[in-house]
Image (cartoon, rainbow, N blue to C red):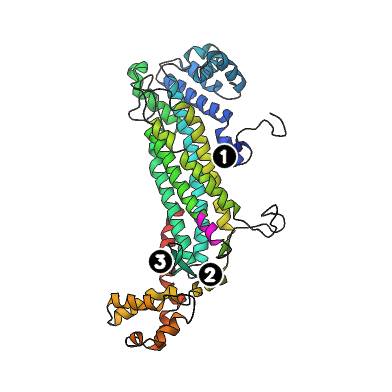
Amino acid sequence: MADDGAALFCPLEFRYGRPEVRDLFSRKARLGRALRVEAALAQAEGELQMIPADAAEAIARSATTDRVSLARVDALERDLKHDVMSITRALAEASGSAGRWVHFGATSADITDSALALELKESAVVLREDLSALARALVTLAQSHRATPEVGRTHGQHGVPISFGYKMAVAAAEVMRHRRRLDELLPRLTVGKMAGAVGTGAGFGRHAVAVELGVMRRLGISADEAPTQIVGRDRIAEFTNWLALVAGTAERLATEVRNLQRTEIAEVAEPFDEGRQVGSSTMAQKRNPVQSENVTSLARLIRAFALPPLENMAQWHERDLSNSANERVVLPHSILLADDVLTKLTGVFEGLRVDTARMAAEVNRSAGGSMTESLMLALTGRGLARTDAHELLRRLTKDPGSGPSLAERAKKDPAILQWIDAGEIDRLLDPSAYVQAAAEKTDRVLASIERDIRQ
C-alpha cells in the first residue's frame, strides 16, 4: 500500500471510524479469532481423549498469528479457493506431526460462526461504552439546565415551555433503552457452534455434546441450542436491526441540534474551533453543524445495512453461502459506523454551547402565546367549561407575537376577569414557574438513569 494512501479504497479506511475499533476487524484479528476456535476444539477433544493430549497442546501452541501467518493463509487460499481450509492447512503445517488432528470432526461454519461470536462480543463492549458515554454527556446537560425554560415545539411551531434539561433527559433515557436492549440481546447474539456439517454433531460421535460445551467454555460464549450448519441468522438480523434503532436515535438527536442551531433559532451550537476551523470555502461567517450533519448521513447508511441480514435468514435447507459475502461487509461497516456516530455525538453534546438568553427570548417571542395552556387550565379550574376556555384563548391568540401581549389582552378581557383576578395573570403566564414540573420530572428521570448507568 502506498504511503500517500493512493491505494485506499473504502472511506472507512481513512475517513470514518476510530483506529482502535477498525483494528477489531483487521484480517489479522479475524485470523486470530479463527485460530482461537481451532485451539479450543483441539483442547476440548484432547480433554475427552478423542485426540492425543500432546497433539492437542501442540495445536493450541501453534494456533497464533505468529505461527500461522496471513501470508501463508493467503498463499494457500489462492490454490484452494477456500478460506477456512486454508487456515486449517496452515495450522496443520505449523503443528508438525500433530497437524493430522487439526479441525477433527468440525465443519467450516463451526469455526467462522464461533469466531464471529467472539468478534461481536468484543464489539458489544465498545458499543455499550459508547452509549454510556453519550448518556453521561446528556445527563450533564440535563442537570445543568433542569429548569432552563425553552419553548417546546410541535409541528415546528411554538407549543408550551419545557426545560432544556428535560429535553436532554428524554434523550438520555432513549440512549439508555438502547443499552438495555443490547444487554438483553447479547446472550442471543454471542453464540457459536461446534456441531458439524448440518448441526447434529454426528462427526463427534458420543462426545458431541461434551466437545461443544468444552469449546464454548474455553471461548467464553454459549452454543446455539439448535443450529443447522450455521448459527441461526435471526440472531444477526436482530443485532443489525438494533444498530438501526441506535442509528435512528443518533439521527434524531443530530437533527435536533441542527434545527436548534438554525440562524433564526440559534439556541444551541456545536463546538467550533474558532482558532482553526473553517465553516465554508467562500462564506467566511459560517459556523455549520457539520458533525451533526455527518451523523445524520452515516446513520442513514447504518439503517440501510439492516436489510441484508433480514434477507439472510432465508437459507436453502441447512445452509447456503448467500449470507457470507454480505456479512463480511455489513457487520464491520455497521459496527464501525455506529461507534463513529455515537462518539461524534458525545463530542457534540460534551461541547454544546447553550444560549439560555436566546431560549428566553424565543419563549417570549409569542408574547405569552406559548402559555395558553396554563391560563386555560386555571379558567377551567375556576368554573369555566374547558371548551369555552379554549375558545376564549384561541380568540385572544389569533395573531401571536404581534400587538399586545397575551397578559395585556387577558387583563382587559371581561370573560377572563370574571374568573381570574388581573393580578394572577402574570403568575399564570410565567414560563419559569411553568417549567418547574419539567425540572422535577428531569430529576426523577436522571435518578433512574444514574442508577442504571453505573451498572
Q: Residues within 10 Å of mark 2 (few under 14, many from 20)?
A: many
Residue 261, magenta (yes or no): yes
- Mark 2 vs mark 3: which is more N-terminal? 2
Q: Nearer the viewer, residue 443 or 2?
A: 2
- Mark 2 vs mark 1: which is more N-terminal? 1
Q: Nearer the viewer, residue 216 or 124?
A: 124
Q: Residue at x 56, y 65 (%)?
A: 264
The image quarter in which residue 237 lies: top left
Measure the C-alpha gap from mark 2 to mark 1. Answer: 38 Å
Prevalent SS, magenta region:
helix
In this view, the mark in front (2 or 3): 2
Measure the C-alpha gap from mark 3 to mark 1. Answer: 37 Å
In this view, the mark in front (2 or 1): 2
The image quarter in which residue 155 lies: bottom left
- Looking at the rendered structure, the secondary structure element under dot 2 is helix
Whether residue 190 can be seen here: no
- Looking at the rendered structure, the secondary structure element under dot 3 is helix
Q: Nearer the viewer, residue 367 or 313?
A: 367
Residue holding disc 1: 21
Residue holding disc 3: 441
Where residue 117 sits in the image (x, y, percent)?
45, 32
Residue holding disc 2: 359
Q: Residues within 10 Å of mark 1 (few under 14, many from 20)?
A: some
Q: Quadrant of the N terminus?
A: top right
Kindly identify the amino acid type of the residue bearing the numbered disc 2. Answer: Met
Kindly identify the amino acid type of the residue bearing the numbered disc 1. Answer: Val
How many labels, in total? Answer: 3
Q: Residue at x 41, y 87 (%)?
A: 411
Magenta segment boundaries in residue numbering? 255-263
Where residue 111 sits in the image (x, y, percent)?
46, 24
| For the residues bearing labels 2 and 1, Cβ distance under 8 angstroms | no
